[in-house]
Amino acid sequence: MRYTGFIALLFFFYNTHAQGIEFFHGEWKSALEEAKKHDKLLFVDAYAQWCGPCKRMAKNVFTKAEVGDYYNTNFVNLKLDMETADGRTFGAKYPVSAFPTLFFLNGDGEIVKKVTGGQQVEQLLALGEVAIKSYDRSAEYAIKYEAGDRDYDLMINYIKELNKVGKPSMKISNDYLRSNPKITVEQKAGFLLEAVTESDSKLYEQLIDAKTAAVKVSTLEHFTAKVRTASFVTIEKAVEYDYPDLLSEAIANYKRADLGDDKKFEMEANMKYQSLSGNFMVWKELSDKYLKKYGKKDPLLYKQQLTTIKKDFSHDTTAKTYACEVCKGLVKKLDSADNYTGYIQSLIDCKKYEEARKITNEAIEKSISREEDVKQFEKVLKYLDTI
């Protein structure tokens, strides 16, 4: 019980070290307009400041990296205090009887999904997936497609909808391009940016060939993100089907994109393959080389490795020990209070109490200008003195 209580004293590493949900700043009607503009659903956390479950979600769920990655990609997000003027206006249209109430609204303001009560990380991620699949408009496009309509805007939106809800789209994309539609080079590039889902495909090859036009109609960052996402999907297939040649193909195809970071990606690809396969020792060896080569210039890579340990090797005691090593390296690069907190938490998880005490004292010395940090670490020190 004492240890459970102590956990609350720490900022709790995977909350404070995460890039969580980025919430819209502005009134709810403006957020709805933003969602419609980007063809996304609006996620609304309708809360009250005094609500305990609301506070726990804000601290322990919305701050998680995996939650932020998913919700920032797929939704426009809004936290709405229902006791403010804007909240009351929202409540007049969308009544709330308990807190928190979570809404998913389409661009026209229609409720796609509504749930009452606090959610854990896995529940909130699953809820987001259900909301997206519930807002499946592909049938609207399918009717026109089956009737023979091959208008460019129809096709690109049809493919976008199919991919959004996880329905097969590759055959339709290939059939459309094989029909030699009368579209410009730029339009074809834009279509391929929507159509490509994996790197072991002819669509991917065409996208790479159309790189110049693809960057022109979007950005280099968007093109790079598409290539990386497609490559990692193929790596996941390599593990799922136990077909290592797909890993080699994903690496080779990535190099064709000529993004200037082939060696780095190759290491990331191999680490991804080993982490998904559950091969910790092989992954660790790769991770050490990766951090040694790239971690000095980009300390955030240490946090990425810690996220992988938590996600894929959480039940491996050896992995917990390695997490301490990675935390130590992170603190050397970025000696923030948050990073010290993560390091101390990892040491305690490994029952390295003397080392945790030493690092806590070090953190107090480094945090002398921030009174709140010092008080936090002093509480940790008092706990450690009881062990």
Image (spheres, helix red, strand yellow):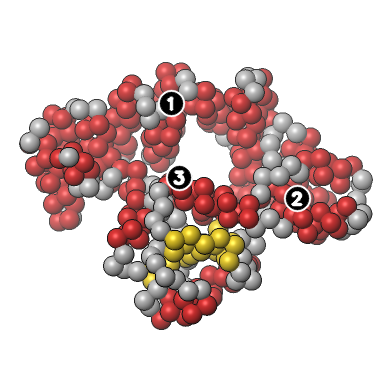
Q: Are marks 1 and 3 in contact (CB under 8 Å)?
A: no
Q: As displayed, is residue 8 above or below residue 292?
A: below
Q: Earlier in the sequence, mark 1 or mark 2?
A: 2
Q: Quadrant of residue 112?
A: bottom right
Disc number placed over residue 298 in the picture, else none: none
- Specify whether residue 339 is in view: no
Q: Amino acid at mark 3?
A: Glu
SS for dot 2: helix
Question: What separation in Å lies between label 1 and label 3 (alpha carbons)?
Answer: 27 Å
SS for dot 3: helix
Q: Are marks 1 and 2 in contact (CB under 8 Å)?
A: no
Crowding around mark 2 (Cα neighbors within 10 Å: few <14, some 14 to 19, many 20+) is many
Q: As displayed, is residue 32 above or below residue 74?
A: below
Q: Position of residue 290 (x, y in %)?
A: 45, 28
Name the residue carrying label 1.
Answer: 287
Residue depicted at x 89% and y 42%: 178
Q: Is residue 205 left or right of 67 when viewed as pictured? A: right
Name the residue carrying label 2.
Answer: 159
In the rendered picture of this protein, how many numbered marks are placed on residues? 3
Q: Amino acid at mark 1?
A: Ser
Q: Amino acid at mark 2?
A: Ile
Q: Earlier in the sequence, mark 1 or mark 3?
A: 3
